């Protein structure tokens, strides 16, 4: 069974060396493809230094698309199982790929994603958000579970993920063009096609962000647009209840730990996310797309 890993990059020199070294030391050997979209830093030279074990594909920055670029790279790969990592996701150990692929022992599982653990220097609210979204309990779910899980049925992350090639191609692959959340949208396609999805928390990566309020807003405008554009695919996917659960989990955690300053920062980010999401949905409705 062949395994491929695909990593889209743009100015990834901060992470890419450590990430590639970790992936090359995994217990499962894999074809590794880095698809770079016009980096102006040392990303290209770092990848080329590992040319004996890592393949570099290059596209222009204008041609990058969250779904289309990943799909293009997958179709150039050889793996029966194809993994995706973002450029800043660092496996926590040498068994990450092995543990991710173990979910395919269930024959109807078409895709699986791993756990994200915030970097040690991340804000406390970011650590708690990662704990909420990526708990330590494994899970397999199907279309029949949508009433139970609601919007969480479609929660999926290409930060660290794996797909059965056969199932991926059967549903037509990632949507393209798409401005974000290509992982969520293919998760919906797979569920509605009768496949199961899996979450494998034992397959973990270090990954977190320090978004400014402006970045948070812009990101959630894009998410809102996509959620509205594909609303017919996301049946039973109201995110309001899940949002309140996350708010209570992170807010109470910060309060218990006495992180009052971060509590205010967190609520500011929540307000910006909410506003961006709603405005994104309205922009999508106004544009008719």
Image (cartoon, rainbow, N blue to C red):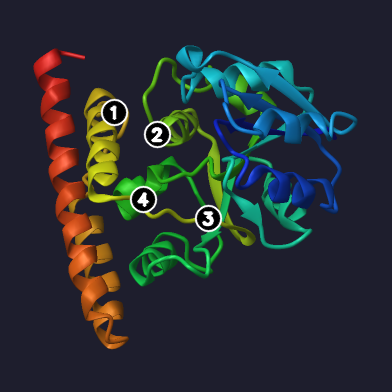
Crowd class of label 2 (few under 14; some 14 to 19; many from 20; radius 10 Å): many
Picture coordinates of residue 81, whole percent (x, y): 73, 34
List x then y, in percent, for residue 40.
57, 26
Q: Mark 1 sits on what residue? A: 226
> What residue is drawn where x is 9% and y is 18%?
286
Q: Give the Cα separation between the discs numbered 1 and 2.
A: 7 Å
Q: Going from the N terminus, do you reach mark 1 or mark 2 first?
A: 2
Q: Residue at x 54, y 36 (%)?
A: 195
At mark 4, the secondary structure is: helix
Q: Nearer the viewer, residue 260 or 274?
A: 260
Mark 2 near mark 3, Cβ–Cβ under 8 Å? no
Q: Is residue 134 or residue 123 the one in the foreground?
A: 123
Q: Position of residue 2 (x, y in %)?
A: 83, 32
Marked residue nearer the N-terminal end (2 or 3): 2
Q: Residue furthest right?
A: 52
Q: How far is mark 4 from mark 1, CA to CA?
A: 16 Å
Cα distance between the residues tagged 2 and 4: 14 Å
Q: What residue would you read off at disc 3? A: 207
Q: Nearer the viewer, mark 3 or mark 4?
A: 3
Q: Which residue is mark 4?
A: 152
């Amino acid at each position: 069974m062949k395994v491929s890993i695909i990593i889209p990059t743009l100015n990834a020199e901060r992470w890419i060396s450590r990430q590639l070294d970790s992936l090359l030391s995994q217990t499962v050997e894999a074809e590794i493809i880095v698809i770079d979209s016009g980096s102006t830093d040392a990303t290209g030279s770092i990848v080329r230094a590992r040319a004996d074990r890592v393949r570099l594909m290059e596209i222009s920055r204008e041609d990058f698309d969250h779904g289309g670029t990943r799909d293009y790279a997958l179709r150039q790969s050889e793996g029966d199982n194809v993994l995706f990592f973002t450029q800043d996701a660092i496996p926590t150990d040498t068994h990450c790929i092995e543990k991710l692929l173990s979910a395919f022992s269930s024959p109807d599982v078409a895709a699986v994603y791993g756990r994200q653990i915030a970097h040690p220097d991340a804000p406390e609210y970011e650590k708690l958000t990662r704990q909420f979204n990526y708990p330590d309990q494994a899970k397999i779910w199907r279309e029949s579970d949508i009433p139970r899980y609601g919007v969480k049925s479609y929660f999926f992350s290409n930060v660290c993920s794996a797909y059965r090639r056969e199932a991926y191609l059967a549903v037509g692959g990632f949507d393209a063009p798409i401005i974000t959340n290509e992982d969520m949208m293919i998760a919906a396609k797979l569920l509605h096609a009768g496949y199961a999805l899996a979450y494998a928390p034992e397959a973990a990566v270090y990954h977190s962000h320090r978004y400014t309020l402006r970045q948070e807003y812009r990101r959630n405008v894009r998410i809102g647009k996509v959620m509205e554009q594909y609303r017919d695919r996301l049946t039973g996917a109201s995110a309001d209840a899940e949002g309140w659960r996350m708010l209570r989990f992170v807010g109470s955690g910060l309060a218990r730990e006495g992180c009052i300053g971060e509590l205010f920062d967190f609520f500011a980010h929540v307000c910006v996310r909410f506003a961006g999401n709603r405005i994104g949905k309205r922009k999508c409705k106004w544009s008719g797309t």
